[in-house]
Amino acid sequence: MCVVLAALFCSATVSSCAADDPPASPRATLATAKQTLDATKTVHFEVTSADLPESSTVLVSGEGVAQRPDAFDGRFRLATGGVAVTLKVVSVDGRLYAQLPFTDHFAAISARDLGIADPAELLDPHTGLSSFLEAARQPRHVGQSRVGREVLDEIRAKLPARVLDRFLLVDNPRAVVDARFFVAHDTGQLRKAIFRGPFYDKQKPTTYTIVLDRYGEPTTISKPRRLG
């Protein structure tokens, strides 16, 4: 009976059931996650936020597919003074295009207008998400959880804001951001990263969560046909 109950408990969406073998060292887990992310040709990601200020232009959320070496197709939601808009975004060959509200065409824009770097750089091994894993300070393994059939190792660390600023803009580049990384125990794939720090206000931290899935899924990203 105990075995049956344990199996049912572990099949829940989230639980504390551990993998059969113990996790590697925190630094080794992050190194494997970086290697795995650097090897994939594509990845789908979603960005969400919490504790955003209402007095400035902020990145609320976003989702899309990044393709190596420098392409992206997705959308981002921005807000200014509580008023939000969603922009469809395509990035190809170092040029970023957005479909502005109430239009049927795309226009070239600056990536920093989105409150992030060019999303096509997400997979860049030197400036993208995997570089955060390499730059993590004082990493420590704090436990495991199960999401579906995957066991995730959770690593907590500190991250220099100047490193995170390569992708998400940070108001104080000299600050230190709290980071949490969730790495699939069996595949080494980074599944989620949570960052909390002074993105917009030095006194009031904001949280950004990035969720990754669909590693290596075939996709085709091309320059928008309708340009204004």
Image (cartoon, rainbow, N blue to C red):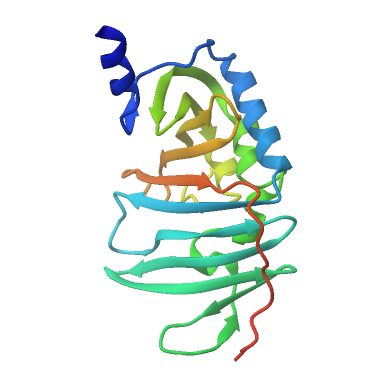
Residue 30 as seen in the image, left or right of residue 2: right
Q: Position of residue 227 (x, y in %)?
A: 62, 88
Which quadrant holds residue 178? top left
Q: Residue furthest top?
A: 2
Taking the image as shown, residue 186 lies to the left or right of residue 41, namely left
Picture coordinates of residue 46 (x, y %)? 46, 53
- Across and down, in percent, residue 224 comes to 64, 81
Quarter of the figure with the C terminus: bottom right
Q: Quadrant of the N terminus?
A: top left
Depicted 228 relative to depicted 111: above or below: below
| 152 to 194, vertically: above or below | above
Residue shown at 26% from the left, 15% from the top:
5
- What residue is at 66 percent from the left and 55 percent from the top? 121
**Residue situated in front as seen by the camera: 154 or 166:** 154
- The reply to whether residue 117 is in sight is no
Do we see residue 84 in this rendering? Answer: yes
Residue at x 66%, y 49% (from the top left corner): 216
Please report the residue visible at 40 percent of the width from the left and 34 percent of the height from the top: 148
**Rendering quarter of residue 129:** top right
Count how many numbered circles sit on residues in the image. 0
Residue 77: image quadrant is bottom left
- Residue 6 percent location from the top left of the image: 30, 15
